[in-house]
Amino acid sequence: MDVVVIGGGQAGLSASACLAQKGIEHVVLEKSEIGASWRHRRWDSFCLVTPNWTVRLPGQDYDGTDPDGFMSGGSFVEFLERYAEDFNMPLRCPVEATGAVPIDGGWLLATTDGPIKCRAIIVATSNYQRPYLPPCAANVKPGILSLNAPDYRAPAQLPPGRILVVGSAQSGGQIVEDLLIGGRDVVLSVSRAGRVPRRYRGRDAIDWQNRLGLLDRAATALDDPRKRFGGEPLMTGRDGGHTLSLQDFHRRGVRLVGRVEGIEGAALSLKSDLRDNIQRADQFAANFCRDVDDHIAQNIGQYGLTAPLDEGEASHAAVTAMTDYEEPRHLDLADEGVSAVIWATGFRFDFNWIKADVFDDYGYPVTARGETTEPGLFFLGLNYLHSRKSGIIYGVGDDARYVCERVQRGLE
């Protein structure tokens, strides 16, 4: 076998399409099924947070009638299934790669379907491999349901009572809204995540990020490598996409509290950082809008942009003070009537099964746009693999083309 691609999501399937175009023998191993993380780690009402026009995989761009809309998670899985079928991709599932060791002339893979020898491997398993739970999550009182965000499906699955959501980045914020729509009372432990308006001055935030060059920001430009793993700014594509904010949650009855410091039974201890976290999120939005304003002022002639400030948009840009809330250091979950805790606290990656000296102090692969110093070992689809867009649907195709070019050269 020339190449084994590990992972059957958008990154792995993109690699398969590029390898096939070059006539390179390969197989795609997927431990579950196509688009497994989109199927099993998202709630029922989930929608993409990037517009449909950003869905552009090698050989197959979005060709529907709503480029500015947002696919549901299920629709995106169907897109991936059609993609694999149309390109007759050599997919084997369920087959999990459990070990990878370099050997003379290539690699030896241990899999749940037996060993495979190949000349190169492309690891396309994403950053989101293991849901992370803070250690204190183990101390939640028996009788209070405690679950990871990937295990949440819908408000009806939860017992009667208030719901505590821990984490206010993209997943946490969208789950809060889903609970509110489902008629549930919510307490939100606010993290340090930013937020951006869904639309500003006539365009979607992702469109502006692209125009500002933010999606092309190189991994080497990060002042702290840990920023590759931080929570994504609060945003949603639900119901056509709209702006989410902590202020709006507060207005809709969500009780906002600081970050969780610890739990003992029903006793929740909190950091006194709620005010700072609200201001941090607002400042993130204000900075984004300021950058858009500056970009328009500097390029109005070049682009011919007509970008009026729509009614109501100014509130998305300003740092908004909130005074009518408490900032408690302790909460009794029983007294608050909390029946369930949803931990929207992110994921961890794990590449320990790959026996190669190509990882940094955080266990993250060190690559030149996906190519490692270990012959025949490549990565694809990771956050900031090459640039900001490497880890999102919009950028994975460009990286896949580059990686497969490098694979081809190595095989020659």
Image: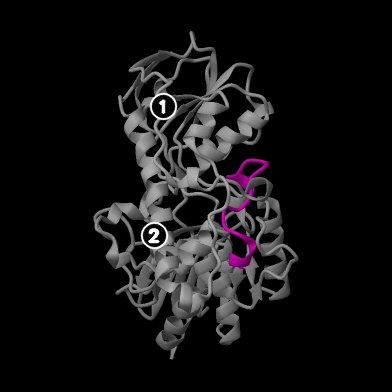
Residue 139 as seen in the image, left or right of residue 88: left
Q: In the visual, does 179 lie left or right of 86?
A: left
Q: Which residues are magenta?
A: 39-55
**What is the x, y in percent for residue 206?**
52, 60
Element assignment for label 1: helix
Density class for disc 2 (Cα within 10 Å; few <14, some 14-19, many ≥20) is: some
225 lies above or below 138? below
State the residue at coordinates (39%, 56%). 290
Q: Amino acid at mark 2?
A: Asp
Residue 166 is one of the magenta-drawn residues: no
Provide residue 299's location: percent of width, then percent of height.
Answer: 43, 73
Q: Which dot marks residue 137?
A: 1
Badge nearest the viewer, 1 or 2 = 2
Q: CA distance from mark 1 to mark 2?
A: 39 Å
Q: Nearer the viewer, residue 73 or 71?
A: 71
Residue at the far right in the pictured view? 65
Q: What is the number of callouts on the image?
A: 2
Q: Give the amino acid type for the residue marked by disc 1 in the picture.
A: Ala
